[in-house]
Amino acid sequence: MEERIVLAFDVGTQSSRALLVNNQGKILGKHQIKHVPPYTSAQPDWAEQRADFYYENICQAAQGLKVQLPQIWERIEAVAITTIRDTVVCVDKKGKPLRPAILWLDKRMAKGRPKISQMTRIMFKAVGMEETANVQFQKSHCNWIRQNEPKIWEGTDKYLLLSGYLIYKLTGVMADAAASLVGHIPFDHQTRSWQKKTALTHPVFDVESEKLCDVVESGEILGRISEQASQDTGVPVGLPLIASGSDKACEILGMGCITKEKAAIGLGTTATITFTMDQYIEPERFIPPYASIIKGCYNPEIEIFRGYWLISWFKKEFAEKEMRQAEELGVSAEELLNQRLREIPAGCEGLLFQPYFTPNVTMPTARGAMIGFSDQHTRIHIYRAIIEGINFALMDGMRLMEKRAGHTFKEIYVGGGGSQSDEICQITADMFGLPVVRTQTYEVSGIGCAMAAFVGIGAFNNYQQAVEAMVQKKDVFQPDMRQNKIYKRLYEEVYKKIYGRLAGLYQTLYDIYHEDADAN
């Protein structure tokens, strides 16, 4: 096969990367820029960042890559971009941001509930959807901005996700990929288009249609690199920018999980378990399966917000020793910590962790919890308990999705930063009782993004061909079923019951905290 090369931008919560990828799935070059800081918090629970901060970082990453590999750089045929989801930017008629971007991590809440008819409210109540609709309304940044910054909302010409804003900066076109439109926005994943005004749930995210951008299918041309973007990035003027999908949509494709028997686990800032199927089946009640990069397919998904972000939190709060040693040895602190995971037996000698530092829609008042402490437990017990706790939560998600979809998974594919660790991959295999597959790179989101570009330029006829050419199994971790037996008991007899036992206390904490906040 003749080698062809594309440039993929991958914008995460904690860094931006520019990747040169060929049509055999090899990353020929990479330049990464850390986000310092990843976000700012003007008030508790806020998470904001300058929208142009991300553009400046991808420009810097691109220019760095061009300097590293000038000969390969000249062979780029197309560009694609993938970003974090549910991160919003308000722009005026000139495309200028009116306020900082609000990140997916932000926990501010709008007040009130959606303006729906009495009949619709009765219907929602009858099927148990009323509270979900209310929570979604309150979590939607568009509603908060409308209530608290009405002049900003009035001046907003387009309400974009971060992906749409960066596409505009690169091409001058206000458009986004259908598979990128994941967030608190009025998007219909079943039709892969914006909701009609008459849709029952439209009042939950009541963004005026004129404030919404055009929708383009993955593999199609969004626009072409503008003269200004060419100066900023070093990418030749006129190269096509091909629509791909969100970071998670690209991740699942980049792992090669395009059949329903393969589960994809993303061990990134947000931990996820997802798969691809051709039926519209909700992973949880009232939560849509997201539009796949592959047209006609969906990615049902369970998210653990702040998943492997918890590793960064642990390092900062508990691992000063390992961070010092890592600096002296010229390795990462994670590498030292992961080596020590072997010291701790399965189940952490009775220490269990529930990782809901940021609650989701179905458990809006949940918090993190750790139970089972005794005097034998150390920092490393806590570290392993965090990893096991994330996996227990993902196991919850897997079982729920298997039940709703009516099938069982045969293999698990892993990607994201956590998948670099042999120890974490083996723990995951032992806990799930399934083979865990690691592909040729943990940069799976970048690989999936590149696949969309290759399909767009005709290097492959479809995504099946792209997967066959660009995804290779590198390692397979077989489960130790003796360890799995321990994990099964812990999951069934303890972990599954933790949330039910603590839910009332979580609600009380929520009430006390918010009553105090309202009083101040």
Image: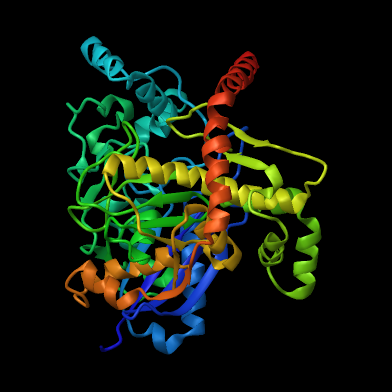
Image quarter in which the N terminus is found: bottom left
Image quarter in which the C terminus is found: top right
| Residue 79 spot, x, y in % from top left | 33, 70
- At a point 52% along the width and 58% down the height, the residue shown is 481
Front residue of 204 and 101 = 204
- At a point 39% along the width and 57% down the height, the residue shown is 264
Please tell me in which quadrant of the rendered image residue 327 appears.
bottom right
| Residue 112 spot, x, y in % from top left | 42, 17
| Residue 199 spot, x, y in % from top left | 19, 28
- At a point 33% along the width and 85% down the height, the residue shown is 75
Figure check: 490 above or below 363: below
Q: Is residue 452 left or right of residue 105?
A: left
| Residue 55 spot, x, y in % from top left | 46, 59
Q: Is residue 48 left or right of residue 398?
A: right
Front residue of 171 and 456 = 456
Figure check: 346 above or below 352: below
Please tell me in which quadrant of the rendered image residue 328 appears.
bottom right
Observer able to see residue 166: no
Observer able to see residue 67: yes
Front residue of 376 and 132 = 376
